[in-house]
Image (cartoon, rainbow, N blue to C red):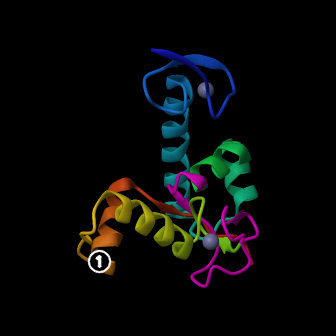
Amino acid sequence: MEVRQCDFCRMPYQSVGKKICSDCLQKLDEDFIVIREYLYDHDGAGIEEVSEATGVTRKTILHLLKEERLLVGDENGNGCGILTCESCRKPIRTGRMCANCKKEVLTAIQQSVSAVKPPKQSRREILEEESIRGVAKLQLKK
Ligand SMILES: [Zn+2]
Ligand SMILES: [Zn+2]
């Protein structure tokens, strides 16, 4: 066991390989479920509205966005301004990097590990994967 600083609450904790302490992990899971429930009935709710209605802090919502458990903005990725790619600074809807930069990083990793390319994922498979992971869609108010 190693003592680390929790990525979320910044408190030291005994790490078992995760970046977040178990208290925060549990709280984030609970908050995520609350937000997902709210978004079922309020499709297109903005971050402020969700935060006020659910009592989940903006910080938590942003964290869930970066963990790719929530999406923000419309299909064109316009008007978000909430998230930007950490590599090229393009606006993104979820996670830390845009699709292009992610692909480049993945390609670089794959090339260093092996030359075999994985089979291309169909859009359907990607969607199924997302639903398994439980991505909820958070829209920004226009
Ligand atoms: Zn914590
Ligand atoms: Zn990028």
Quadrant placement of the C terminus: bottom right
Placement of 61 over or under 84, stated as above or below: above
Q: Amino acid at mark 1?
A: Arg
Magenta stretch encompasses residue 81? yes
Kindly identify the residue that appears in the image at 61 percent across and 85 percent down.
76
Rendering quadrant holding ligand 1: top right
Relative image position of residue 2 (x, y in whole percent): 50, 16
Placement of 137 over or under 77, stated as above or below: above
Kindly identify the residue that appears in the image at 54 percent across and 25 percent down.
21
Q: Nearer the viewer, residue 16 or 43?
A: 16
Relative image position of residue 125 (x, y in whole percent): 27, 72
Q: Nearer the viewer, residue 116 or 57?
A: 116
| Element type at mark 1 | helix
Placement of 74 over or under 82, stated as above or below: below
Relative image position of residue 139 (x, y in whole percent): 63, 69
What residue is pinned by disc 1? Answer: 124
Range of residues picked out in magenta: 66-89
Dot 1: within a 10 Å radius of its alpha carbon, few (fewer than 14), some, or many (20 or more) residues? Answer: few
